[in-house]
Amino acid sequence: MESKFPKDFLWGGAVAANQCEGAYNEDGKGLSVQDVMPHGLRGGRTAAPTDDNLKLMGIDFYHRYKDDIKLFAEMGFKVFRTSVAWSRIFPNGDDEKPNEKGLEFYDRLFDECLKYNIKPLVTLSHYEPPLALAEKYGGWTDRRVISLFERFAVTVLKRYKDKVKYWLTFNEINAILKAPFMCGAIPDANLSPSELYSAMHHQLVASASVTKLCHEIIPDAKVGCMILGVTVYPLTPSPDDVLLTMLRDRETYQFAHIHARGEYPPYLLKYFERNNIRVDITEEDKKILKNTVDFISFSYYSSICESADKNSEKTGGNLSRGCINPYLKSSEWGWQIDPKGLRYTLTKLYDMFSLPLFIAENGLGAEDILIDGENGGKTVNDDYRIKYLNDHLVEVEKAIDDGIPVMGYTSWGCIDIVSASTAEMKKRYGYIYVDRNNDGSGSLARFRKKSFYWYKKVIETNGASLDRGTE
Ligand code: BGP
């Protein structure tokens, strides 16, 4: 069947520095919050890095990026999403001068991408603020962190202005309300709502300010926000469930609203007022927020249901959990699989904000079994992953056919990396298997999975090879 994907569709994959690079203390890098979160999101933090933190070595991308990018190029990637680790460039977050060695690493990395005509899509902050900001400032609760972030962003934007034309400000910016330490270097577990929402506000102002700076420094750049795209359905047609779903949706879409419309939605301001939440939104902040994004990007893995019934059974998930949808199956980690939910989210976001969309993350975390492959190599028969990705892409194509401008698709963890929520290797997303285990053992060798060849074909045919079933 003829493909409906636009000719210039950006096919690719995504990772984050802290989940793949390793080399956590090499070439002048400072510690990031991830270096003291050995067990992921729910595991708390340690005082200093510990040996059981798989992120300290990641998949050694810092040293192996050339071979890995070569593999991405073999699949035909048009785009590669990664982040610049803030603590590689400003080891303490507030240093006066950047760390040249850190900057050189990303020069080499982006050059390597460009060698194969792969466009870098760069996230400035992907769950990896410098740890020193937690200790010295209480993280993003302190307004001064806005200018520290601007300093980092300007340094990076100026340095890579000829190499990187696609930028994202904060990964899943809505996540700060759920994981304040990981997203905002906020050490205090007993944070008041006013402090938490102030931290959120500071990130939103920083995001808008960096959007402006990026447009000034790189006039031909496209800057997007990045939202954790939680798709929510009412569990039943009960008006209570429907209303709750609407309210839950607002928790996500308010972030897109601020980035796309340049102001707080009235319902969020009302929420502050009703709950006595004090956020200092200055006149200057309001002006800065007017610097809106060029596109909206989001992550999409699964959907959840909302119910007024407090006893309804809950799904798995990393940051957003909800009620189980009886019509859907789940991944081994309890994330409900819902390809149609992706079309729903694309449609909803476009109906609300009329901006181009980018699917910055999507994928299936699964346990893979390495088997013997051709020519003495190894491989994985990951038909389950192929099915997941295929079915989601078929829904993306339908959204495109409905007239929604979708710029690109970077599937998550295109090479196996350490997971964010559980900090393990066992949960794999990649087209490329990395020989590394939860106990830290493994040769770090890379092997092409069956999905590697499948995705190569999808890109080669611009989506025409997707299996659209009988629909
Ligand atoms: C998103 C994060 C990623 C990523 C992904 C999958 O929320 O932006 O960093 O890891 O989720 O989650 P996990 O790694 O926990 O399976």
Image (spheres, grey):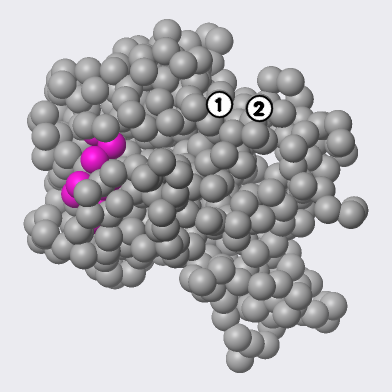
Bin the neighbour count of mark 2 within 10 Å (Cα to Cα): few under 14, some 14-19, many 20 and up.
some
- Left or right of 224 in this view: 458: right
The image shows residue 47, relative to residue 89, as above or below, that is below
The image shows residue 392, relative to residue 332, as above or below, that is above
Whether residue 234 is visible, yes or no, is yes
Distance (Cα) linking label 1 and label 2? 7 Å
Q: Earlier in the sequence, mark 1 or mark 2?
A: 1
- Left or right of 142 in this view: 431: right
Residue shown at 76% from the left, 56% from the top: 340
Q: Which region is colored magenta?
A: 54-62
* Furthest-front residue in this view: 375
Q: Amino acid at mark 2?
A: Glu
The image shows residue 456, relative to residue 58, as above or below, that is above
The image shows residue 336, relative to residue 159, as above or below, that is below
- Ligand 1 has an atom within 8 Å of the beta carbon of the residue at disc 1: no
Front residue (pair 143, 361): 361
- Left or right of 126 in this view: 81: right
Residue 59 part of the magenta-drawn span = yes
Front residue (pair 241, 145): 241
Residue shown at 60% from the left, 60% from the top: 384
Q: Residue 5, percent across and down?
A: 76, 30
Residue shown at 65% from the left, 34% from the top: 457
Determine whether the residue tagged by mark 2 lies in a helix, strand or loop.
helix
Please say if the residues under marks 1 and 2 sit with CB atoms less than 8 Å apart. yes
* Furthest-bottom residue in this view: 311
Determine whether the residue tagged by mark 1 lies in a helix, strand or loop.
loop
Mark 2 = which residue? 460
Residue 61 part of the magenta-drawn span = yes
Q: Quadrant of residue 314?
A: bottom right
- Left or right of 12 in this view: 266: right
Q: Of the numbered discs in the image, which one, if any, rests on residue 76?
A: 1
